[in-house]
Image: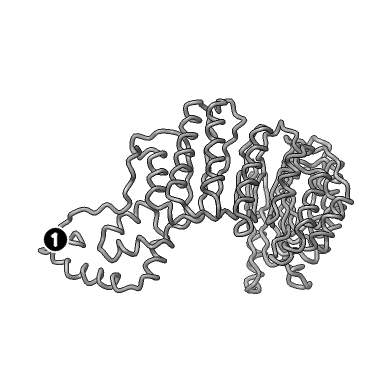
Amino acid sequence: MVEEESFYEDTDTGDETGEDPSDDSCYYISEKMSEWDSLPHVCLQHVFRLLPDRDRRSAALVCHHWHKVMRSPSLWRTRSFHFTGRLNKYKQSEYNYAVGYALNLGVYLERLEVSVWPPRKRFIAKTLEETISGLLAALISVQAQLRSFSLVKLELDRTSWTSRNRKALMMSLHVFLQRGASKLTSISLNWMQNSIHQGLELLSALLHSQRRVNPRYYISSLDLEGFFSMEVNVRLNPIMHHSMRNLQGLTELRLSYSCLSDELLMALQSRHTSGQLSSTRNGNSLQTLSFHCALIEPHLQVVRGGSWASLVSSCPDLRVKFSVDQLIDTEVLARMLLPEIPLREYSMTAHYDPEEECSAKPVLCDMLPQYSRSLQNLNLDMTNCDESLDEELLGLVKVCECLEQLTVCAFLEVNTVNRLLHMRLTEKTSLNKISVTIYTIEDDPEEQEDQLEEILCSYLHLPPELEFYATLYPFV
């Protein structure tokens, strides 16, 4: 049996403050402690909430009052673990720490986030499997009432994960979903990178768990970005569509673009249509649909605009978010960014070689302007070394009447900052969050720095609702 870690182990100090009564400063310290001791519980809880575990354990030993306040459930409702699978002779093992924490305080947990450093060695993968399985078993044993659960970055398609370790970990997750996840409303399993068999089995277990407790609790937020391995072609699999169709309470869904198909959009539409009355009554129709598309993942499928239009007609409040990584092929992007999509957020990372025949201008000039009445958040990170995009960017910002947040990292003229601010202050717009990072490759950027400083000094009195940030960043 694992030795539990006590977060509140009492020690005999002879005096609650641990001070020597003969010390001249004892009275002064005691007086200060009495001031802290007189603080209401709610104030102490707010202070303790900001402390790391080590300081919380120390604070719990100060006096009986602090010890009692430290046991407040509100201090232990959220927890984040980051597991590496590595041993450290100076620290308690990740297994003992996580299991001890769950056995002592898991009954208070409502939100749990577990991230993993993807293993490169088999013995590390085995340690990670034992740690995660032990944590899940401990949560079941204390009947933790989790509302949100996140397990990310497992990357199970690595060769360091043996079939035995994968199977043991999947079994632990299945048991957890069946016996310890009855109140979950939010689940994130991104970058798990399952095989198609393991991934679909896990989705079936999730669906079975929700059926058992519905309608009291349902999964409203589901993050499955990178859930399947990049080599898996799941977009036409009927089990995938069946699972999406039967998650009746879903309001927020995040997937890899490789999962997108006409059949998936039809499944999401029929999910809403079949439960339209209850969904409308409970306010849980699909509201946010996010896709991440990377160059190294499958992304050449064709999706009809009619499928998007049908989904939007069933979910009029639907907001779609697209994140594109290293993909700048105009033909592919034009096939993805259809005018029927109610695009609210677009993020693009494009680090392309100047010698390649690539250009971001079609995206800025032709594709994104078609969302001028829906686009609210725009994030661009581009290494356009030999391509000027200043006019295209300013033109896009000008036509997007609903744009609220703009984040740009690119090779731009410093004066673009001035023109952007002038546009924001002289034209009617909802753009209140602007962050501009200008890449520079000059050996002596002092002239650009002086120019940027002069521009910023001329706008010292910006509107209080405007959050503005601009800087130069040397590009290596």
Tell me which residue sits at (80%, 66%) in the image.
Answer: 401
Q: Is residue 253 left or right of residue 95?
A: right
Task: Note whether residue 383 is visible.
Answer: no
Using the image, determine if residue 166 lies above or below residue 175.
Answer: above
What residue did someone put label 1 on?
20
Q: Position of residue 360 (x, y in %)?
A: 81, 46
Which quadrant does the C terminus fall into? top right
Q: Amino acid at mark 1?
A: Asp
Q: Quadrant of residue 294?
A: top right
**Viewer-proximal residue, 253 or 399?**
253
SS category of the residue bearing label 1: loop
Tell me which residue sits at (69%, 49%) in the image.
Answer: 254
**Viewer-proximal residue, 305 or 448?**
305
Q: How is the image coloured?
A: one colour
Using the image, determine if residue 39 lies above or below residue 379.
Answer: below
Q: Is residue 371 left or right of residue 104?
A: right
Q: Position of residue 100 (x, y in %)?
A: 37, 45
Q: Residue furthest front?
A: 212
Using the image, determine if residue 448 lies above or below residue 138.
Answer: below
**Viewer-proximal residue, 406 or 315?**
315
Count numbered badges in the picture: 1
Tell me which residue sits at (32%, 41%) in the image.
Answer: 3
Q: Position of residue 367 (x, y in %)?
A: 85, 52
Q: Residue furthest left?
A: 22
Q: How packed is label 1: few (under 14 Cα within 10 Å), some, or many (20 or more)?
A: few
Tell me which residue sits at (68%, 56%) in the image.
Answer: 249
Which quadrant does the N terminus fall into? top left
Task: Note whether residue 121 is visible.
Answer: yes
Q: Position of residue 126 (x, y in %)?
A: 48, 29
